[in-house]
Amino acid sequence: MDVTILAVALPPPVLEGKAVLVGMPRGRDVVSPRPVVGEAMRFDAALDVVVTSAGVDYRGPWVQGPRGDRFLHLCWGHDEGEGFVLQRRAKLMLDVLDPAEMASAASDATLEGRLSLVDARGEPLCAAVRPPQIRWTLVRGS
């Protein structure tokens, strides 16, 4: 299933004198971290919805965490010329998704997460992110 993360509010592009970069890890590597620019950012990933005897599980290279506690990451950091340096992460928790709805989702459905990337202090959002901080919607193909 395709996943689209829409960040609709962004932190300042520079923190502590360093340009802020954000990206999603695929496996252990943050893929194409990019500068915070504009009023919104979009991140695309994918996950496999697997129905097991224990319920619904999410798998794939973008999915992080142990079974029952799966999530997608947004990673914040900077690059001082030697590659991406991680500063903090936001865990977009998948355990809040309706298992029945996810299990019956059409193969052409997209899971869309919409959130602000700014916490109450105006800093990049970090820690576990669940509703109401993120709004997950299953968008079915036309």
Image: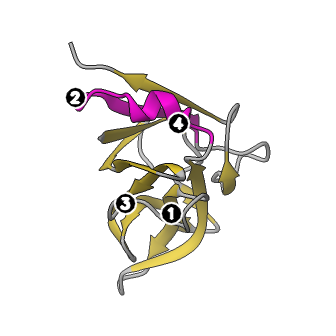
Question: Do we see residue 8 in this rendering?
Answer: no
Where's residue 11, x and y in %?
59, 46
Depth check, mark 1 against mark 3: the one in front is: 3
**SS at mark 2 in the image:** loop
Q: Which mark is residue 75?
A: 1
Q: CA distance from mark 1 to mark 2?
A: 27 Å
Q: CA distance from mark 3 to mark 2?
A: 18 Å
Tell me the residue that label 2 is attached to: 108
At 72% from the left and 45% from the top, the residue drawn is 119
Quarter of the rendering containing residue 96: top right
Specify the amino acid type for callout 2: Asp
Among the two numbered marks 4 and 3 on one chain, the one whose residue lies closer to the N terminus: 3
Specify the amino acid type for callout 1: Cys
Depth check, mark 3 against mark 2: the one in front is: 2
64 falls in the magenta region? no
**Quick one: 111 or 48, which is closer to the camera?**
48
